Image (cartoon, grey):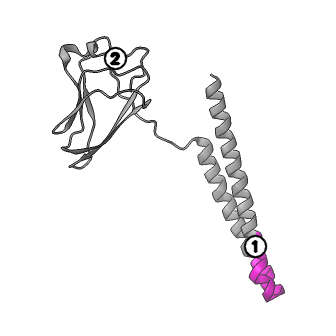
Amino acid sequence: MNSGRRDVASSHFDGDLPILLDVGAPIVEILGITSQPTSLHVPAVVIDDTAVKIAPGLIARGQTISFSLLVDGPAPTLSCRASLVDVTVQEKREPTRQQSPGDQLALVKGIKITVLALAVLTFLQALTDLATPALSMVGPGAIALALIVAITVWELARMWARRRRARRSTRQD
């Protein structure tokens, strides 16, 4: 991905050396190469055992080139070697999704509410068993289920609203 302010031109490849993306396992086949935006060309690509070599060519500002590879080996790892003039190469990791404290709190609340609902259900079951057998089949189960569903939907709605507010505040910054 060229996230810089300028294009990376062929002239930026020092000594015409390619960018080498080594996956640490033998590459069997290139399954696909895509470019975003699609209107931009992809520089020539060659497979060399465990590496993809990207020949000198234009990588436009804002362009992302993606490779889908079939490799033969367990747990491939990616490393990059590039000799580019006036270009800083950095590894970009996709952020991992971690539970926020609010998500964890909502989960704990949900567990507490479920335990409470089961306690209420048990109490109602005992009462209706004393009253009538027909009521004991439908009444408490339906009440407890409705209570659990309503509270779960309410907690999820609150969690989604918090996330939406957090996204809006980061966009405005």
- Which residue extends farthest front? 39
Q: Position of residue 45 (x, y in %)?
A: 24, 31
Q: Residue at x 51, y 42 (%)?
A: 98
Closest to the camera, between mark 2 and mark 1, is 2
- Mark 2 highlights which residue? 8
Residue 127 located within the stretch drawn in magenta: yes
Q: Residue at x 35, y 24 (%)?
A: 90
> Relative to 41, is 72 above or below?
below
> Relative to 94, is 107 above or below?
below
Quadrant the C terminus occupies: top right
Residue 164 located within the stretch drawn in magenta: no
Q: Residue at x 62, y 53 (%)?
A: 108
Q: Within the image, what quadrant is residue 101 found in? A: top right
Q: Are marks 2 and 1 in contact (CB under 8 Å)?
A: no
Q: Amino acid at mark 1?
A: Ala
* Cα separation between marks 2 and 1: 65 Å
Please give the range of residues in magenta. 123-143
The numbered mark at residue 142 is: 1
Q: Amino acid at mark 2?
A: Val
Crowd around label 1: few <14 · some 14–19 · many ≥20 (10 Å): few
Q: Secondary structure at mark 1?
A: helix
Which one is nearer the viewer's eye here, 74 or 30? 30
> Relative to 134, is 24 above or below?
above
